[in-house]
Amino acid sequence: MKAILLLFLATISSVSYGQNEKFLSFELAGSGGIASINYESEFFRKEKIGLTYRLGFSFAPIDKNNGTALVFPLMIHGTCGKGSHKLDAGIGLALTVTTRAAFYAKTPMSLGYRFQPTDKNYYLRVAYTPIMGYFVDFNVQHWGGFTFGYKLNRK
């Protein structure tokens, strides 16, 4: 888990050039739980391969003992493909704080298809997005996610 966090911080600190694509996205289900709003920025592009980092926010009511969970998914995504059709894979860390002061982290992953038309300012992603928990015991929550992203910087 520390390695993922260090990789994430190193990625954010290395983003310094102005040609990277930036997106605001809404994900239904997926790495943030029920739904999340995310900021994404591409930090590497070479021919068919691209890397993005994603910072998000989500909240969900749990129960009266735990209150509401505030979820902050932090993800690194890789894309592979030419043109509009790409394979999309990601891994990250979902930090969660409840309104009753409980804190925990899980590991979300993503494997799916990304449709990003080259002449448009949006993308669509459909993915299998399991979330692994490992504090009390190891468990996997099987999720699927649908994402709509809108490009903030137009070319």
Image: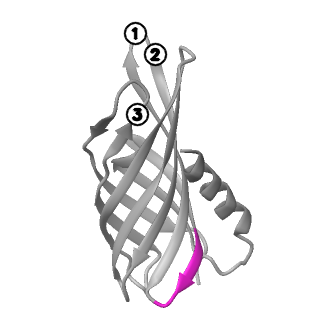
Residue at 45 percent across and 70 percent down: it is 78
Q: Secondary structure at mark 2?
A: strand
Estimate the x, y position of residue 49 in percent, counting from the top left.
46, 82
Please say whether residue 125 is one of the residues in the magenta stretch: no
Residue 96 in percent (x, y) is at 51, 32
Q: Nearer the viewer, mark 3 or mark 2?
A: 3
Q: Residue at x 59, y 84 (%)?
A: 155
Q: In this figure, which residue is indicated by the disc labeled 1? A: 64
Instruction: Name the outermost residue toward the top.
Output: 65
Q: Nearer the viewer, residue 154 or 37?
A: 37
Instruction: Tell me what residue is drawn at x 44 percent, y 28 percent.
Output: 135
6 left or right of 83 in image: right
Identified by mark 1, the residue type is Lys
Badge 2 amino acid:
Gly
Q: From which residue to which does the magenta span run?
A: 42-47
Q: Answer few, some or many: residues within 10 Å of disc 3's Cα (few below 14, many 20 plus, some between 14 and 19).
A: few
Residue 67's mark? 2
Residue marked by disc 3 = 134
Q: Are marks 2 and 1 in contact (CB under 8 Å)?
A: yes
